[in-house]
Amino acid sequence: ISFVLVAQITAAFQYVLEEYMLQGMRLSAKKTIGMEGFWGIVYMSVMVLAMNYLPGSDHGREEYLPEFAVMVSGSSAFQRLIVSFMVCIAVYNFSGLTVTQHISAMTRCLIDSCRTMLVWFVSLGLFYGGYPQYGTPWTQNSPLQLLGFALLVTGTLGYNKVIRLPGLTYPKVVLPTPAGVWSPK
């Protein structure tokens, strides 16, 4: 639970920082992705080098870099998978940053939460659609998951004022009246 909590706090910090960079500093989404990608490569390079020297079960190390290099160089399918993954993550990040730039980080976070619901529905559909090895069955906890997703969707729609929830007050938005405008003669 503590890892999930730390991950959520880190993601919240990242979303707020991205919103500040895109809307406050007026950086483009492409530049922001480029900076995140650069720092991500630096961070992960340090982590992989550190894991290469930590004791573990992979040739006595946590991650054995020479073996990884042989695996990548010896498999064109693995190389294509790595490139495909990188492209998918780039498109995902660009889409998310575009939403953050034009709307807000809160909306991006809510949309991202709905992604989990879509994955669960697809997983159920695969299981009951004839591909049980790829899907997940309906379990005794599934009604609770469904209730959670219903609350998530209702909260998202309520936050964005798409639906009005009973018992809540919604202040009327009063637009300021424009000052008198004189036409030139």
Image (cartoon, rainbow, N blue to C red):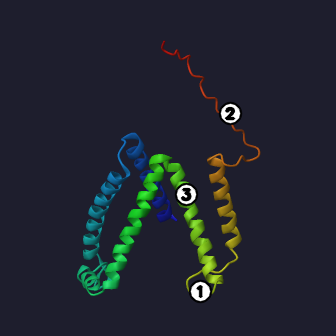
Determine whether 33 is above or below 64 in the image. above
For label 3, count other residues whose C-alpha is less than 10 Å away and answer few (under 14), some (14-19) or many (20+). Answer: some
| Place of residue 178 in the rendered image (x, y in percent of width and height, measured from the top left) | 57, 22
**Viewer-proximal residue, 37 or 11?**
37
* Amino acid carrying mark 1 in the image: Tyr
SS class, disc 2: loop
Q: Which residue is mark 3?
A: 111
Left of 146 or right of it: where is 120? left
Q: Earlier in the sequence, mark 2 or mark 3?
A: 3
Whole-Å distance between the Cαs marked 3 and 1?
A: 27 Å
Residue at the image position 26 percent from the left and 67 percent from the top: 45
- Pick out the residue farthest to the front: 185
Residue at the image position 59 percent from the left and 74 percent from the top: 122
Q: Quadrant of residue 153?
A: bottom right
* Amino acid carrying mark 3 in the image: Ile
Q: Which residue is mark 1?
A: 131
**Viewer-proximal residue, 172 or 169?**
172
Question: On residue 65, which mark appears?
Answer: none
Left of 136 or right of it: where is 8? left
| Place of residue 123 in the rendered image (x, y in percent of width and height, measured from the top left) | 59, 77
| Place of residue 129 in the rendered image (x, y in percent of width and height, measured from the top left) | 64, 83
Q: Which residue is mark 2?
A: 172
